[in-house]
């Protein structure tokens, strides 16, 4: 089978809900990362075979095929470049990356941009369901689904609390993990480690136009006391807004190419795709599937967790990466070394390629060889992608 290579990966700096990116239409935000990755690679935009765009809330300003609209809004891509929008919940743009790699590996395409976008300010989480319900247009839970899962409203918050209880965690452990996420994100920002992956966006301020190039959600100087003071989301539970991912606006993109494209366009690869895995499991506990998807990915690639130099495990809720570490025996020092979604934000459909941008650039800086990325997703699904630095 043909190889697939990553030649660049970019993301916007995260914006808090109602924060610095609130003035950006999601289509234009997505177009900006597409333009940036084409410009940075120096490729002719007309050579791009496809754009695959992950987006979860495909309604309102993200409706009408947001991926295609982003291509049409882009300056560096002609209208001849096709696009498709996909929803695999929080793993949408990681699945976009896997679809892009599969297209290249199959030999059917040579240059594909995998991307993601989510304005959680402009298209709030859940509105694509709740707005229809309010209009009396029905619920996603069908009679047959209700028969199979009676009385269950699939909830990520409920799933996170179930993981806490199943694995014997408590709030103190979750808060300590959250604090470390902020500390690592602060240190990475101060070192300039995100400079190679972040593309700046112009924003209007009372003082004039400025460049947004620093993740807005990092709590500088956070303490266990400040994190522990945040109200629990459920009485008697362990999850709070402080030990869960932050609502976030953002966009990201990764360019995947074939070996032939490397030569034809004089491109330099930064990573090779090693393994693409996606699995489905229990839709009620829901967020535990990365544990078992990682088992399969390692087994299929003939690797052991000790061979992986860096891991990006999405911090949807603190118990997810903690359970992943416990299950896999991974090294905490290799996990989310620049912080994760608790500090940097989780812009839903953009998070997959956002994490890959962070992972591939962190591998470049550390000199590590292998990186693994995984994401918990609504419905009990998980993606795992393993890459090799080249």
Image (cartoon, rainbow, N blue to C red):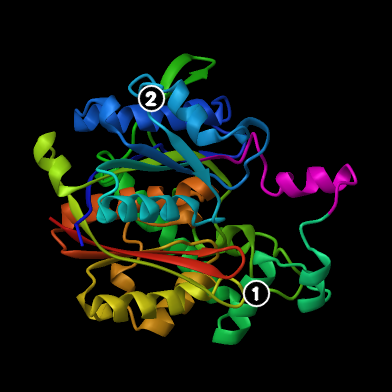
Q: Position of residue 143 (x, y in %)?
A: 83, 67
Q: Secondary structure at mark 2?
A: loop
Q: Position of residue 30 (x, y in %)?
A: 46, 32
Residue toward you, 84 or 385: 84
Reading the image, the residue beneath label 2 is: 80
Which region shows up in magenta?
117-138
Picture residue at 59% right of the left edge, 79% below the top: 164
Picture residue at 43% right of the left edge, 28% below the top: 71
Picture residue at 38% right of the left edge, 24% below the top: 80
| Residue 136, magenta (yes or no) | yes
Picture residue at 13% right of the left edge, 34% below the top: 265
| Residue 33, magenta (yes or no) | no
Residue 161 is labelled as: 1
The residue mark sitting in front, 1 or 2, is 2
Does 141 appear above or below 104?
below
Q: Secondary structure at mark 1?
A: helix
Does 270 appear above or below 224?
above
Residue 309 visible from this viewpoint: yes
Callout 2 environment at 10 Å: few (<14), some (14 to 19), or many (20+)?
A: some
Counting labels gives: 2
Residue toward you, 52 or 292: 52
Task: Quadrant for residue 248, please give it.
Answer: top right
Residue toward you, 277 or 14: 277
Q: Position of residue 311 (x, y in %)?
A: 32, 66
Task: Quadrant for residue 35, please give it.
Answer: top left
Residue toward you, 89 or 184: 89
């Amino acid at each position: 089978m043909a190889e697939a290579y990553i030649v660049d990966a970019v993301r916007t700096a995260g914006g808090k809900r109602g924060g610095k990116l609130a003035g950006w239409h999601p289509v234009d935000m997505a177009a900006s990362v597409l333009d940036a990755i084409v410009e940075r690679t120096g490729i002719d935009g007309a050579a791009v075979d496809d754009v695959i765009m992950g987006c979860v809330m495909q309604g309102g300003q993200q409706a009408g095929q947001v991926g295609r609209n982003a291509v049409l809004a882009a300056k560096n891509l002609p209208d001849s470049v096709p696009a498709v929008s996909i929803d695999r919940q929080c793993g949408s743009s990681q699945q976009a990356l896997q679809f892009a790699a599969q297209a290249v590996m199959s030999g059917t395409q040579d240059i594909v941009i995998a991307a993601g976008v989510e304005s959680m300010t402009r298209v709030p989480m859940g509105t694509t369901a709740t707005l229809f319900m309010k209009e009396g247009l029905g619920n996603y839970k069908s009679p047959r689904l209700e028969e199979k899962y009676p009385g269950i409203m699939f909830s990520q918050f409920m799933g996170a609390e179930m993981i806490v209880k199943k694995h014997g965690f408590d709030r103190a452990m979750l808060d300590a993990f959250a604090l470390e996420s902020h500390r690592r994100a602060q240190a990475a920002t101060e070192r300039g480690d995100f400079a190679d992956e972040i593309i700046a966006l112009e924003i209007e301020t009372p003082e004039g136009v400025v460049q947004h190039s620093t993740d807005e959600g990092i709590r500088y100087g956070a303490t266990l006391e400040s994190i522990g003071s945040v109200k629990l989301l459920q009485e008697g539970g362990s999850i709070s807004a402080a030990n869960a991912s932050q609502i976030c606006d953002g966009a990201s993109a990764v360019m995947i190419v074939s070996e032939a494209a490397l030569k034809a366009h004089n491109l330099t690869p930064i990573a090779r795709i090693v393994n693409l895995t996606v699995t489905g499991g229990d839709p009620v506990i829901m967020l535990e599937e990365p544990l078992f998807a990682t088992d399969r990915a390692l087994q299929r690639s003939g690797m052991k967790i000790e061979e992986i130099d860096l891991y990006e495990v999405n911090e949807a809720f603190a118990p997810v990466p903690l359970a992943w570490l416990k299950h896999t025996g991974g090294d905490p020092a290799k996990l989310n070394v620049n912080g994760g979604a608790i500090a940097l934000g989780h812009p839903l459909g953009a998070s997959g390629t956002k994490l890959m941008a962070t992972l591939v650039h962190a591998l470049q800086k550390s000199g590590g060889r292998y990186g693994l990325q995984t994401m918990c997703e609504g419905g009990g699904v998980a993606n795992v992608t393993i890459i090799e630095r080249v």
